[in-house]
């Protein structure tokens, strides 16, 4: 797959290739990865393009090795990333905790497949908890971005690199196997964000200055308390400045549909059909899964009659929706555990059923 530069017109491209090309255009200097379906095309693309551009590519011996290579590269201030899926991302959880404590700008692309365990290669949203809550130790948060189209795979890859370096925080692009494998028209622009100066912290050689150390170990409890206060001050800033969602037809809505990622496309279509039938249905799609748009959902809960959460898992985002609503109105749930998202007609029928 040939790397595209800025395009004057849209081109047809698979989601995984779009993510990889966007990472190159965002200035990714180092890619370390290990193949796993349904994201292996990202590594395939990088294996040729990174070497062609005289950048670093390593096919690591494991996912554990890959994520720790990213930590090493990011410690020097480099733009570095890895990509993986579900059960393999499970192996990276310790390293993500370390990167959070070290405040390193790692970028991880997670293209979800079925689980738990080895699961299967069908699309899924079963790693919401893994990305948003995390499986590492301690108090930390990763920024999590959820595209719903191949174009958003491009746009949010750019944003992932920007957020990671702006906030010195691990950032996850959380897609699914459907988005990774589907082809859609996309347009590539120049990287739209300013470059972040890392000269104050990167390990770039101590000639002419005092040495630096990046570590997550704080031997005194008092020191760890100070650090965690600082870390959560940063998280509060991210919540205030970067929470993002898409919202349609909520002004007069009796019910608001909530969905993220590729299934939200069917949900949006269902909303449009219901509107034509005279049903007052609105739509909200979290784009940042963390920070989550809890405040906006809480505001809507004061004027709507109910919410319907729709996911391709057993109800992982549902918990966050219920926390935001805080019992103000009912929150219904509709799902398919794994595979293709619920069909539009099935969603419409569910809406009719609960609005009787």
Image (cartoon, helix red, strand yellow):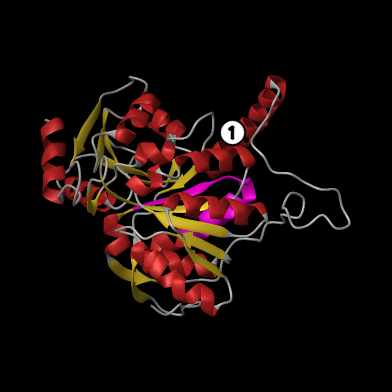
Q: Is residue 331 left or right of residue 222?
A: left
Q: In the figure, 303 relative to 211: above or below?
A: above
Instruction: Look at the numbered disc 1 and give the secondary structure of its residue.
Output: helix
Q: Position of residue 158 (x, y in %)?
A: 51, 60
Q: Position of residue 66 (x, y in %)?
A: 48, 55
Q: Which residue is mark 1?
A: 236
Residue in the picture at 72% in, 52% down: 202
Q: In the figure, 168 relative to 73: above or below?
A: above
Residue 39 visible in the snapshot? yes
In depth, the one of 299 and 295 nearer the eye is 295
Instruction: Tell me which corner region of the image, top left, top right, bottom left or bottom right, holds residue 27.
Output: bottom right
Quadrant for the C terminus in the image: top left
Residue 302 visible in the snapshot? no
Q: Position of residue 134 (x, y in %)?
A: 44, 36
Residue in the picture at 43% in, 38% down: 132
In depth, the one of 249 and 257 nearer the eye is 257
Q: Which residues are magenta?
A: 157-175
Q: Is residue 31 magenta?
A: no
Instruction: Tell me which corner region of the image, top left, top right, bottom left or bottom right, holds residue 148.
Output: bottom left
Q: In the figure, 329 relative to 265: above or below?
A: above
């Amino acid at each position: 797959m040939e790397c595209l530069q800025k395009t004057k017109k849209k081109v047809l491209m698979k989601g995984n290739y779009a993510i990889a090309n966007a990472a190159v255009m965002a200035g990714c200097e180092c890619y370390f990865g290990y193949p796993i379906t349904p994201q292996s095309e990202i590594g395939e693309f990088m294996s040729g393009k990174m070497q062609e551009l005289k950048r670093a590519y390593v096919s690591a011996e494991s996912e554990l090795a890959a994520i720790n290579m990213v930590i090493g590269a990011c410690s020097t201030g480099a733009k570095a990333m890895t990509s993986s899926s579900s059960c393999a991302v499970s192996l990276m959880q310790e390293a993500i905790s370390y990167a959070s404590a070290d405040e390193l700008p790692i970028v991880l692309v997670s293209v979800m497949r079925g689980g738990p365990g080895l699961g299967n290669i069908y699309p899924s949203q079963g790693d919401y908890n893994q990305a948003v809550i995390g499986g590492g130790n301690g108090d930390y948060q990763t920024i999590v971005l959820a595209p719903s189209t191949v174009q958003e795979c491009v746009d949010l890859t750019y944003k992932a690199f920007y957020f990671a370096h702006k906030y010195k925080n691990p950032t996850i692009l959380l897609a699914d196997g459907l988005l990774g494998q589907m082809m859609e028209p996309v347009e590539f622009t120049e990287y739209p964000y300013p470059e972040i100066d890392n000269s104050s912290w990167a390990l770039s050689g101590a000639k002419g200055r005092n040495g630096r150390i990046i570590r997550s170990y704080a031997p005194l409890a008092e020191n760890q308390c100070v650090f965690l206060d600082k870390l959560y001050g940063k998280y509060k800033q991210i919540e205030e400045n970067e929470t993002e969602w898409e919202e349609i037809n909520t002004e007069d809505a009796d019910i608001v549909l909530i969905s993220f990622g590729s299934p939200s496309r069917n949900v949006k279509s269902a909303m449009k059909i219901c509107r034509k039938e005279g049903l007052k249905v609105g739509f909200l799609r979290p784009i940042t899964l963390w920070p989550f748009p809890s405040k906006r959902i809480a505001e809507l809960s004061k004027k709507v009659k109910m919410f319907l959460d729709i996911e391709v898992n057993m109800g992982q985002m549902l918990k966050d929706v219920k926390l935001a609503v805080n019992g103000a109105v009912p929150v219904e749930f509709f799902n398919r555990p794994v595979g293709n998202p619920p069909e539009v007609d099935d969603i419409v029928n569910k809406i009719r059923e609960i609005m009787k």
